[in-house]
Amino acid sequence: MSSHATLAAAADDRKARLAKLKTLKRKQPEEDSAPTESSDAGAAPSPPVDDVAKLHLSGRNYDPETRGPKLGFEAPPTLGLDKPTLEEQAADLEDESKRQAAVDAQDDKGIDLFKLQPKKPNWDLKRELNQKLEVLNVRTDNAIAKLVRERLATKRAAAPNDDAQGEGQAGLLEGTALLEESDLA
């Protein structure tokens, strides 16, 4: 408890000292101006202060000449800059890229009309149809191959098997027949 009491007493003392300093600061301009007037009585008279507003109001938002708020800037913010601003650099880059694009456009030997043509309106339907037709194309190829095999089997059965040369010629015919059938498909 004693430490709490000493801390409270120290806080009260500090508050009292701060209040005393505050009152001294308030009284200080009046006390400074009074002795200077009495000491300046023998010296040359000082010029009177023209406007009280200049003494007490900051010149940040207040214009003492017009006695109103400041309106805008007196000079542009880029007046004293040595280097170009970011906006000026961006404008220069934009102009340079436009010039480069114009040169590239002139260098082209013409416009490729195939690149400019839009896709036909049924391109997506054709894509879906092609996916479905892939399955049918496989089935069609299998059916054609099956028919070719059946024809070749019937030709083998009809061909005479008693001659050795006949078998060789039957194999030859078989190969040519196979080519003819594949060309028809």
Image (cartoon, rainbow, N blue to C red):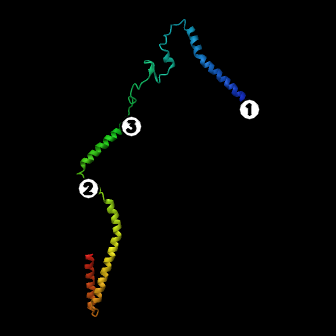
Q: Distance between the residues labelled 3 and 1?
A: 61 Å
> SS class of the residue under badge 3?
helix
Q: Name the residue under label 3.
A: 86
**Badge 3: residue crowd in 10 Å (few <14, some 14–19, many ≥20):** few
The x, y position of residue 139, in whole percent, is 34, 74
The residue type indicated by label 2 comes to Phe
Question: Residue 183 appears in which quarter of the rendering?
Answer: bottom left
Q: Mark 1 points at which residue?
A: 4
Q: Is residue 66 left or right of residue 24?
A: left
In this rendered view, identify the residue nearer to me: 42 or 30: 30
Q: Is residue 40 left or right of residue 91?
A: right
Q: Mark 2 points at which residue?
A: 114
> SS class of the residue under badge 1?
helix
Q: Which of marks 3 and 2 is nearer the N terminus?
A: 3
The N terminus - image quarter:
top right
Question: Residue 6 appears in which quarter of the rendering?
Answer: top right
The residue type indicated by label 3 comes to Leu
